[in-house]
């Protein structure tokens, strides 16, 4: 198992390098000029040229990539052209806000998805199944942006129960886990949780329904095991696939949602990414893309390591 | 006994009365007034002295924390403001050499950190943005302001309260450049370890507000500077909290739910809801125009003045204003009709389809032989208003007079590249692009007229995008540069504007009105006819 984990870890290194290369190249291929983050629209060419030199953007792209990578492996993601702040600090602050939001949304989505999916799987073909399936289809299909607005209109404007935007009455840097702050989390987390909830409900329903028709379940019941004990066996067999799907969904959420974070002015990675794209702030954009991609790499690594722990047959050679 | 009871009663009632009175005295009279302002930007503009994010950012972290040498009168709404003394009490040119300007500085002004404002601070700040050899040079601030103060050739301190600035050529319009140049505290920069990123959070200027708190992308808190030198411009609110909320619907929701007290640019389709909930929509004439800037280069269909005029007569601008929910005003030229530079153009811009069709017919375009033109537009962004619906409206209107417009839609930052490179460049002419749609700030003579009408600013030397070249207009602009009487100057600027309109240099559609939606809690907010707004007028 140890060697398996080390091997998976080593696989992650070329993937991460590939990610840096692709993210750097994509950002450079996009139309626009990095200096538009800093220079006024009508800045004369001499100003733009002097800025290009000042920010090292006049060097060949491979040289820029090499220098950036050299700094990145030391934890220095450069400086945002637009704000002048360190990219690592900017991204770290946004990531912590997104983690908070995505953590709650993931828990809600996975938990509700598992419960609804299991209920639907156990009660296949009944009204409960149809209701759970309907909810999952709604969850997968509903546009985030629209749902966020509707929730805001109902709970913030009409009822006045929850704040419409922001990450605290002060700022996210002063966040504490009390009721006053948690209120700011409810609407964006609820909005964000519907897609994983829908996907996991469908996955769990299909798996549980299929598992219940297997011969080993009939055998377990024939031996007189209680339904709770049978459920434990079913859950254990379903868990690796659900874990893989949940891992991907959590990865998506950790990446932040540009739409949800924009609708709720939540200062996370999605909000920051949006800002960096529109400002053509290339160092910031590269830093965010790298960190978000690394989320997926690390999450996949965790899932790869966890799956064999649950089911030893899944160790891949 | 009865006496005692009365005495007892009166003492107790007096005591009971005194408690709330004391409470009011302690808390009520000194309760801090706070205005929470939802701004349309995605981040707080730079707080080091020269704000980024365009002209609209100066009202937030520019003219609040800092002062210019020459200021813009922004605390009036009934008429356009004018240049007024700022940190300089007077300015004049040397009669022997009109390139030399002498500025007399205001005495007794202190920076927020307590250091004195003197001539050395002005020179230090000019070095900050113009001399890349100086230790305090800041590329970010320089990039913001260098294009705004292009006339400065050199500068020197004459004495503690006098500064001399020499311009590259005689330029009577030079004072208009100075409201953009703001003065940061050299002493504070030294104190924070000569580090502009630290200065950003511990900013120090001479302005009516001090920066109390800055959280990137989330908020900036400005508190009233009780020691401000201009007593007529003391802030009427103790604290202003700036909250970046880039999404218009989110901003409106924040206002409706009571999280903010006023917002910039409410979404037009939410105006009925906002008004119905008791919020007020404030707007005013604003130096901005939403045009199609024509290419007059060989090969462009817009080289024919009849076509340019026909296009200007084909747009029902009132309908565009309606499309914007009333948050715009009809454009009949580069500047608003009430502007002293508007003049009396002989070509009257309006909605006259028969006249437009007749002009097109004269130019040889019919339904069977329509004019085809490609226009580059942005999908949205600052100054672009409701870009796509408005462009579609113009497209349909022009189709009525046999002009078939196709769009090249790009992001705003990309559009700027096309703009700076000019109509003649490969990226425009090479792709068949013959007009560009970009919202223009028209705040001063250079921004409104010179940069578009002067042939010396034909791209890539400037943003005379289409290549307009009229020696008479060039001569007028030269005359303006050597005319120091403001009234005569205004008259000459009006002649330039008349020429632009008579030549139908652009297809002018509407002006932005810089709308704000404000809560009933806001008792006063003076909206100036400018992008520079004076937040000292905000009263809760």
Image (tube, coloured by chain):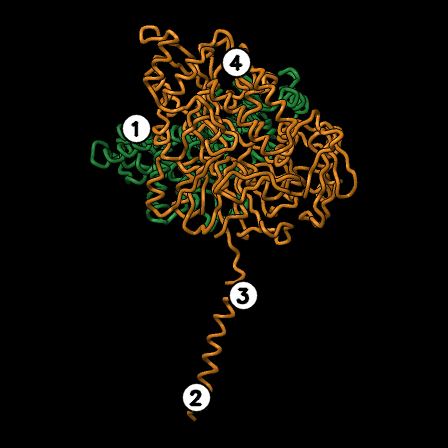
Residue marked by disc 2: B5
Question: Residue B347 appears at what percent x and percent y?
Answer: 43, 21
How many angstroms separate mark 2 from mark 1 (CA)? 84 Å
- Tell me which numbered mark, 3 or 4, is placed earlier along the sequence: 3
Residue marked by disc 4: B423
Neighbour class for label 4 at 10 Å: few (<14), some, many (≥20)?
Answer: many
Image mark for residue B26? 3
How many angstroms separate mark 2 from mark 3 (CA)? 31 Å
> Which is in the foreground here, disc 3 or disc 4?
4
- Quarter of the figure with the N terminus of chain B: bottom left
How many angstroms separate mark 3 from mark 4 (CA)? 65 Å
How many angstroms separate mark 1 from mark 4 (CA)? 60 Å
Quadrant in the picture for residue B161: top right
Neighbour class for label 2 at 10 Å: few (<14), some, many (≥20)?
Answer: few
- Tell me which numbered mark, 2 or 3, is placed earlier along the sequence: 2
Compared across the picture, whether B78 is left or right of B143 comes to left
Compared across the picture, whether B412 is left or right of B487 comes to left
Neighbour class for label 1 at 10 Å: few (<14), some, many (≥20)?
Answer: some
């Amino acid at each position: 198992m140890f060697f398996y984990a080390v091997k998976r870890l080593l696989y992650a290194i070329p993937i991460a390098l590939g990610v840096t290369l692709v993210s750097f190249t994509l950002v450079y291929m996009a139309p626009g000029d990095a200096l538009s983050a800093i220079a006024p629209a009508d800045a004369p060419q001499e100003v733009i040229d002097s800025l290009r030199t000042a920010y090292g953007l006049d060097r060949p792209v491979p040289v820029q990539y090499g220098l950036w990578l050299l700094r990145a492996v030391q934890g220095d993601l450069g400086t945002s052209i637009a704000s002048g702040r360190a990219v690592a600090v900017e991204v770290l602050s946004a990531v912590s806000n997104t983690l908070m939001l995505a953590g709650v949304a993931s828990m809600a989505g996975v938990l509700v998805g598992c419960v609804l999916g299991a209920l639907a799987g156990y009660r296949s073909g009944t009204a409960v199944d149809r209701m759970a399936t309907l909810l999952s289809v709604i969850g997968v299909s509903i546009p985030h942006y629209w749902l966020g607005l509707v929730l805001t209109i109902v709970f913030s404007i009409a009822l006045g129960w929850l704040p419409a935007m922001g990450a605290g009455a002060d700022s996210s840097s002063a966040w504490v886990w009390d009721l006053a702050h948690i209120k700011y989390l409810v609407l964006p987390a609820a909005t964000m949780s519907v897609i994983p909830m829908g996907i996991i409900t469908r996955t769990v329903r299909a798996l549980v329904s299929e598992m219940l028709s297997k011969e080993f379940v009939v055998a377990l019941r024939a031996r007189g095991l209680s339904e709770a004990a049978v459920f434990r066996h079913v859950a254990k067999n379903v868990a690796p696939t659900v874990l893989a799907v949940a891992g991907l969904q959590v990865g998506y959420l950790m990446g932040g949602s540009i739409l949800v974070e924009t609708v709720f002015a939540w200062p996370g990675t999605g909000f920051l990414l949006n800002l960096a794209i529109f400002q053509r702030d290339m160092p910031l954009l590269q830093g965010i893309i790298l960190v978000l991609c690394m989320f997926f790499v690390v999450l996949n690594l965790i899932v790869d390591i966890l799956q064999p722990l649950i089911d030893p047959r899944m160790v891949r050679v | 006994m009865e006496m005692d009871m009365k005495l007892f009663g009166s003492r107790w009632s007096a005591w009971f009365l005194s408690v709330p009175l004391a409470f009011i005295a302690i808390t009520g009279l000194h309760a801090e007034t706070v205005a929470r302002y939802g701004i349309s930007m995605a981040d707080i503009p730079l707080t080091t002295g020269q704000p980024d994010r365009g002209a609209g950012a100066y009202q937030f972290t520019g003219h609040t924390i800092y002062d210019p040498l020459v200021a813009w009168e922004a605390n009036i709404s009934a008429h356009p403001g004018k240049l007024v003394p700022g940190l300089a009490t007077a300015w004049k040119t040397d009669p022997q050499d009109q390139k030399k300007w002498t500025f007399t500085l205001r005495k007794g002004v202190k920076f927020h950190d307590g250091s004195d404002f003197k001539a050395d601070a002005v020179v230090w700040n000019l070095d900050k943005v113009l001399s890349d050899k100086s230790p305090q040079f800041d590329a970010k601030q320089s990039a913001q302001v260098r294009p705004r103060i292009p006339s400065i050739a050199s500068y020197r301190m004459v004495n503690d309260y006098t500064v001399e600035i020499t311009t590259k050529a005689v330029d009577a319009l030079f004072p208009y450049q100075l409201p953009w140049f703001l003065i940061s505290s050299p002493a504070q920069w030294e104190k924070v370890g000569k580090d502009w990123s630290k200065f950003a959070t511990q900013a120090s200027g001479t302005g009516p507000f001090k920066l109390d708190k800055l959280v990137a992308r989330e908020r900036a808190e400005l508190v009233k500077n009780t020691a401000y030198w201009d007593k007529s411009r003391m802030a009427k609110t103790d604290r202003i909290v700036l909250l970046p909320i880039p999404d218009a619907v989110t901003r409106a929701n924040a206002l409706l739910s009571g999280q903010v007290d006023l917002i910039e640019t409410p979404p037009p389709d939410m105006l009925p809801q906002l008004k119905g909930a008791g919020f007020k929509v404030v707007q005013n004439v604003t130096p901005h125009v939403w045009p199609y800037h024509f290419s007059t280069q060989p090969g462009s269909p817009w080289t024919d003045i009849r076509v340019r005029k026909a296009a200007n007569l084909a747009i029902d601008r009132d309908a565009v204003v309606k499309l914007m929910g009333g948050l715009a005003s009809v454009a009949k030229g580069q500047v608003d009709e009430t502007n002293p530079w508007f003049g009396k153009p002989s070509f009257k811009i309006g909605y006259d389809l028969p006249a437009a069709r007749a002009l097109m017919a004269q130019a040889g375009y019919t339904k069977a032989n329509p004019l085809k033109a490609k226009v580059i537009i942005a999908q949205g962004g600052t100054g672009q208003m409701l870009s796509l619906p408005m462009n579609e409206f113009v497209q349909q209107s022009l189709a009525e007079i046999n002009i078939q417009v196709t769009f090249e839609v790009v992001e705003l930052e990309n559009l700027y590249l096309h703009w700076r490179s000019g109509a003649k460049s490969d990226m425009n002419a090479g792709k068949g692009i013959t007009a560009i749609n970009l919202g223009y700030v028209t705040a001063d003579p250079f921004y409104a007229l010179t940069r578009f009408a002067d042939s010396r600013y034909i791209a890539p030397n400037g943003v005379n995008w289409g290549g307009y070249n009229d020696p008479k207009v060039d001569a007028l602009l030269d005359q303006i540069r050597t005319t120091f009487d403001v009234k005569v100057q205004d008259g000459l600027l009006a002649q330039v504007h008349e020429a632009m309109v008579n030549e139908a240099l652009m297809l002018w559609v509407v002006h932005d009105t810089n709308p704000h939606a404000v809560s009933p809690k806001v008792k006063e907010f003076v909206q100036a006819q400018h992008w520079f707004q004076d937040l000292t007028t905000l009263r809760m």
